[in-house]
Image (cartoon, rainbow, N blue to C red):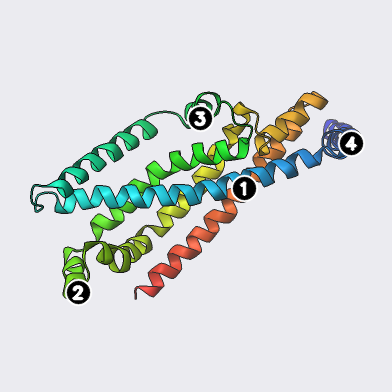
Amino acid sequence: MYNSILAHRVCLALPAWLAKLKDEFYINFVAEDRYKYLVKGLWMTLKITFFAVLLGIALGVIAAIIRSTHDKTIEEMRPGFGKGLLIVLNALVKLYLTVIRGTPVVVQLMITYYIIFASSTNTLLVAVLAFGINSGAYVAEIIRSGIMSIDNGQFEAGRSLGFNYIQTMIYIIIPQAFKNVLPALANEFIVLIKETSVSGYVGIQDLTRGGDVIRSRTFVAFMPLLAVAGIYLIIVVFFSKMVSILERRLRNSER
């Protein structure tokens, strides 16, 4: 008897709960086309991530080459301008890696926006530079580990083909290193997508900021923030799956 009464009450309460959920969905996403805040924010997040990854890879490759060249050749180099230049460049790269990896990305973003580019109105450029420089420090260590894992015999093979050190790095070492660290680079891309969620600190209308704008208009936090979290989750799961497929293909190609 008690169970039947409880079941009856649940059946009566369920439509009301669904109606409330429907109303909240309408208020948060349909009314005044508020879903567009999420669409525009997602587009901004993807743009920042894409260009920041390109900048990060470029900076990371340069920093990794300098660091690995110093570690592999500094003891064999003769005293002179070249050796001194390499020591200075390596010291600058180490300083760059220490500062960037030792400070929060949101602080770096705010310094870039409010201090370095205080007179700029191009928030996209500021965000790309901030996140790209931050990502470059981590990419540098990933690629450096890939370069250092290449056997020294590959350098000797390049020399036997008549390549100088730079040509050997470009045509032989870097392609092999990229293949070894490609899954790690893909994971860095996934991490960077989530790190861009702090872009709203400098007024950038990214995905997280879009959800927060909806919350400020409707005074309902649950549904817009849940939608933002769901979109990030879908993106991360999708790219994680792509990374898994990439790793599987790389393993199969080595057989």
> Spatial distance from mark 2 to mark 1, Cα to Cα?
42 Å
**Which element carries disc 3, helix, strand or loop?**
helix
Q: Nearer the viewer, mark 2 or mark 1?
A: 2
Residue that carries the numbered disc 4 in the rendered image:
31
> Spatial distance from mark 2 to mark 3, Cα to Cα?
45 Å
Identify the image quadrant of residue 126: top right
Q: Nearer the viewer, mark 3 or mark 1?
A: 3
Q: Earlier in the sequence, mark 2 or mark 1?
A: 1
Residue that carries the numbered disc 3 in the rendered image:
112
> Spatial distance from mark 2 to mark 4, Cα to Cα?
68 Å
Q: Earlier in the sequence, mark 1 or mark 4?
A: 4
Q: Are marks 3 and 1 in contact (CB under 8 Å)?
A: no
In the image, 204 versus 211, the foreground residue is 204
Q: Earlier in the sequence, mark 2 or mark 4?
A: 4
**Mark 3 crowd level (few <14, some 14–19, many ≥20, 10 Å Cα):** some
**Mark 1 crowd level (few <14, some 14–19, many ≥20, 10 Å Cα):** some
**Which residue type carries mark 1?**
Lys
Q: Nearer the viewer, mark 2 or mark 4?
A: 2
Residue that carries the numbered disc 1 in the rendered image:
47
Quarter of the image for the C terminus: give it.
bottom left
Residue 27 seen in the current view: yes
**Mark 2 crowd level (few <14, some 14–19, many ≥20, 10 Å Cα):** few
> Spatial distance from mark 1 to mark 4, Cα to Cα?
27 Å
Q: Position of residue 76 (x, y in %)?
A: 9, 53
In the image, 107 versus 62, the foreground residue is 62
**Which residue type carries mark 2?**
Gly
> Spatial distance from mark 3 to mark 1, Cα to Cα?
18 Å
Residue that carries the numbered disc 2 in the rendered image:
162
